[in-house]
Image: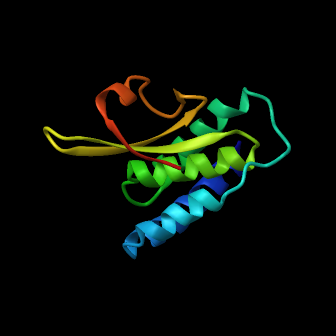
Amino acid sequence: MQWMVLKGWILLAYLDCVMHLGDFKRLHRIVRAQQMNAKTTSDDRVPRVCRAVDLACALYFKRVLCLQRSAATTILLRRDGKKAELVIGAQLIPFRSHAWVEIDGQVINDKPHLPQVFQLLDRL
């Protein structure tokens, strides 16, 4: 578990640098480019990966944004052989945007009702 938390923390730092440069296109390419590993692991790894990223967020030296957290979770899950999708949505009134991760249409790293609250903007 510690190794997974460390990998999550390093990935958060890398994505933070990308986001700090204001390069959303690059973040988009990074997530899209992460292929799903052919070697699939057991389904009990999904909550462990989510928990590891949450711990990495808690240990990170500044506030982690939902896009950064969800991109890191998506990448780690794909490396683990899961068909994870980064979902970005928006709410118009009041305006808010949010990012989360889904597997087979189920939210796995946030509240399950998010797809009903936010309109889909992108699915990576």
Q: At 50% from the left edge and 70% from the top edge, which residue is drawn?
A: 26
Quarter of the image holding residue 46? top right
Q: Can you name the residue that lies furthest to the right here?
A: 39
Residue 90, above or below 59: above
Q: Is residue 32 left or right of residue 99?
A: right
Question: What residue is at 66 percent from the left and 49 percent from the top?
Answer: 76
Residue 30 drawn at (x, y percent):
58, 64
Q: Position of residue 45 (x, y in %)?
A: 72, 33
- Is residue 48 or residue 19 the one in the foreground? 19
User: Splitting the image into 4 quarters, where does residue 53 fall?
Assistant: top right
Q: Is residue 124 above or below residue 94?
A: below
Looking at the picture, how far across and down is residue 20, in whole percent? Answer: 38, 72
For residue 7, side relative to residue 116 (left or right): right
Residue plotted at (42% across, 72% down): 23
Name the residue rendered at 17%, 44% in the picture. 95
Is any part of residue 13 visible from this angle?
no
Q: Position of residue 21 (x, y in %)?
A: 40, 76
Q: Is residue 115 above or below residue 31?
A: above
Instruction: Determine if residue 43 is in view.
Output: yes
| The one of 3 and 111 positioned closer to us in this rendering | 111
Taking the view exactly as shown, the residue that stands out farthest to the bottom is 21
Which one is in front, 122 or 98? 122
Q: Is residue 68 left or right of residue 39?
A: left
Q: Quadrant of the N terminus?
A: top right
